Image: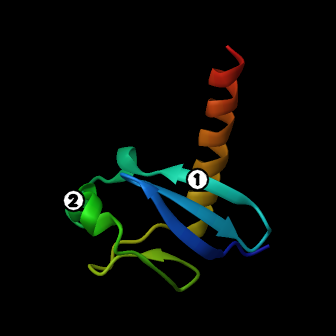
């Protein structure tokens, strides 16, 4: 299945709540992935909030974006890490 972001909301800082076309809803914290000059402006929360859904993923006004597959895998990984932390 070709993954697409169909809904996105800012939660806090550099974290988004995303809904994918497979029905999965995940939150993703992107702070550790904002490397390089194109992602530098996204470190400021006010700019980070200015994303939109474009070409089936999220994109910011400066053209920065992430592949939906990357966002999905990151969301799954962070969800699993959170579940492990909560068990301990």
Residue located 26% across and 79% down the image: 62
Q: Nearer the viewer, residue 70 or 8?
A: 8
Kindly indicate the quadrant of the structure image that contains residue 72.
bottom right
Q: Nearer the viewer, residue 33 or 49?
A: 49
Q: Secondary structure at mark 2?
A: helix
Question: Where 18 falls versus 80 (above or below)?
Answer: below
- Residue 6's x, y, as percent? 65, 78
Which numbered tag is attached to residue 79? none
Residue under pointer 1: 27
Question: Where 23 falls versus 36 (above or below)?
Answer: below
Determine whether label 2 and label 1 are within 8 Å by CB: no
Residue located 72% across and 19% down the image: 87
* Lower position in the chain sequence, tag 2 or tag 1: 1
Left or right for 45, reference 11:
left
Question: Where 10 falls versus 52 (above or below)?
Answer: above
Quadrant location of the N terminus in the rendered image = bottom right
Residue located 36% across and 47% down the image: 31
Residue placed farthest to the top in the image?
A: 88
Residue under pointer 2: 40
- Residue 20's x, y, as percent? 69, 69
Rounded to the nearest whole Å, what is the CA distance between mark 2 and mark 1? Answer: 21 Å
Question: Where 2 falls versus 80 (above or below)?
Answer: below
């Amino acid at each position: 299945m070709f993954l697409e972001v169909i809904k996105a909301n800012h939660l806090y800082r550099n974290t988004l709540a995303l809904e994918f076309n497979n029905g999965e809803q995940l939150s993703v914290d992107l702070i550790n992935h904002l490397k390089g000059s194109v992602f530098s402006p996204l470190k400021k929360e006010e700019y980070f909030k200015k994303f939109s859904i474009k070409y089936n993923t999220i994109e910011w006004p400066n053209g920065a974006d992430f592949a939906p597959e990357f966002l999905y895998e990151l969301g799954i990984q962070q969800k699993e890490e959170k579940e492990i932390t909560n068990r301990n």
